[in-house]
């Protein structure tokens, strides 16, 4: 038996893991409650409109040590249970063609990045719920084979704001949260108190579950089947705090989903209802160590997506500056 199959988690169900269960009717009521359609112009920047130049100035002024911590996973070209569509990387020039000096070496990269293997940003065009993108735009009219005409990643540009790390394993004194374990609103409140940090308007909230550490020590598993993440009951608190960006070392959703018939409910609430872009598949292990050493869980966050007109997201290398 391989290490990945030997340590593959059993999907959690019910109140002990990913629960409590949420009915579709309850979910739809929650969607309406946190929806911010019609609040901003331009609408396809969604909650990122909250981040003003003054907010960026304050976030920059909070830098103390100048420690820079990258948060991207390595470019993953190996197939596995959590990487069924591996990224591509091959050389296109090895410098062995006769030509005037100097010799050159060139390579090609590509990725179907909306999965579990690549650190990436989800733009507002990535998620539709009941046929609607954020702000009520009809998905079939706004996104076609040529790309997105609303909510494209190119409308976001570089994202610079204050970041807050919710390091749940550090708070709970565990190595990681087990896949299928939900993070609730009460856990966010407890984490803020334990880490002496407060989520504020325009902030980026990053959830560390210890996913990367567990994978490194026990092997890969199918994260679509079981992963730690936010329960939908955490979203109203995040909406109340008026966040601008949400991210995690998984993809923010607890899996299996507690909502019948909705496989990624936090995605639907954050992106389609609240207009909040998502950062998926972060490596937060180095940031966990750096924030613990500094004794502070806030930092300057810089995310610069590729300028892809019509793109529904982009591979990224987010950077925290403490």
Image (cartoon, grey):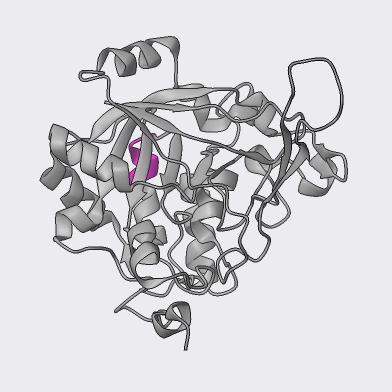
Report the span colored magenta.
237-242
Q: Main secondary structure of the magenta part?
A: helix
The answer to whether any part of residue 180 appears in the image is no
Name the foreground residue: 194 vs 177. 177
The quarter holding residue 19 reads bottom left
- Residue drawn at x 22%, y 63% is 175
Left or right: residue 124 compared with residue 32: right
Answer above or below: position of 138 versus 150.
below
- Comparing 1 with 104, the one in front is 104
Magenta span includes 240: yes
Residue 278's x, y, as percent? 51, 43
| Residue found at the far bottom of this picture | 1
Q: Is residue 107 left or right of residue 270?
A: right
Q: Is residue 272 above or below residue 160?
A: below
Above or below, comparing residue 52 to residue 314 in the picture: above
- Report if residue 296 lies within the magenta region: no
Position of the C terminus, as image quadrant, is top left
**Residue 2, image x and y in percent?**
47, 83
Residue 263 spot, x, y in % from top left: 57, 67
Residue at screen point 13% across, 60% down: 173
Nearest to the observer: residue 119 or residue 102: 102
Residue 168 can be seen, yes or no: yes
Name the spot of residue 151 as percent of width and height, x first.
68, 34
Name which quarter of the figure residue 224 lies in: bottom right
The mark tally for this picture is 0
**Going 44% across and 21% down the picture, which residue do you hit?**
51
Residue at (46, 34) in percent of width and height: 318
């Amino acid at each position: 038996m391989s290490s990945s199959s030997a340590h593959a988690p059993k999907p959690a169900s019910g109140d002990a893991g990913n629960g409590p269960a949420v009915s579709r009717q309850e979910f739809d009521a929650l969607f309406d409650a946190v929806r911010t359609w019609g609040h901003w112009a331009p609408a396809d920047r969604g909650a990122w409109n909250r981040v003003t130049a003054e907010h960026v100035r304050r976030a920059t002024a909070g830098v103390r040590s100048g420690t820079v911590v990258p948060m991207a996973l390595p470019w993953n070209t190996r197939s596995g249970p959590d990487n069924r569509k591996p990224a591509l990387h091959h050389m296109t020039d090895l410098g062995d063609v006769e030509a005037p000096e100097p010799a050159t070496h060139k390579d090609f990269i590509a990725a179907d990045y909306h999965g579990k293997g690549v650190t990436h940003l989800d733009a507002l065009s990535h998620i539709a719920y009941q046929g609607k993108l954020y702000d009520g735009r009809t998905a079939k009219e706004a996104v076609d084979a040529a790309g997105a005409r609303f909510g494209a990643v190119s409308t976001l540009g570089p994202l610079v704001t204050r970041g807050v790390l919710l390091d749940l394993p550090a708070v709970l004194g565990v190595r990681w949260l087990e896949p299928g374990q939900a993070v609730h609103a009460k856990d966010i409140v407890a984490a803020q108190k334990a880490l002496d940090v407060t989520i504020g308007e325009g902030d980026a909230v990053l959830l560390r579950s210890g996913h990367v550490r567990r994978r490194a020590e026990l092997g890969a598993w199918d994260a679509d089947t079981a992963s730690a993440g936010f329960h939908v009951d955490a979203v109203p608190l995040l909406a109340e705090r008026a966040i601008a960006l949400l991210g995690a070392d998984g993809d923010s959703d607890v899996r299996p989903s507690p909502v019948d018939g909705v496989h990624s409910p936090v995605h639907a609430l954050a992106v389609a209802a609240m207009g909040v872009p998502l950062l998926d598949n972060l490596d937060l292990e180095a940031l966990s160590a750096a924030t613990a050493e500094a004794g502070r869980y806030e930092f300057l966050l810089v995310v610069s997506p590729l300028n892809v007109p019509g793109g529904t997201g982009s591979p990224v290398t987010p950077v925290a500056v403490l």
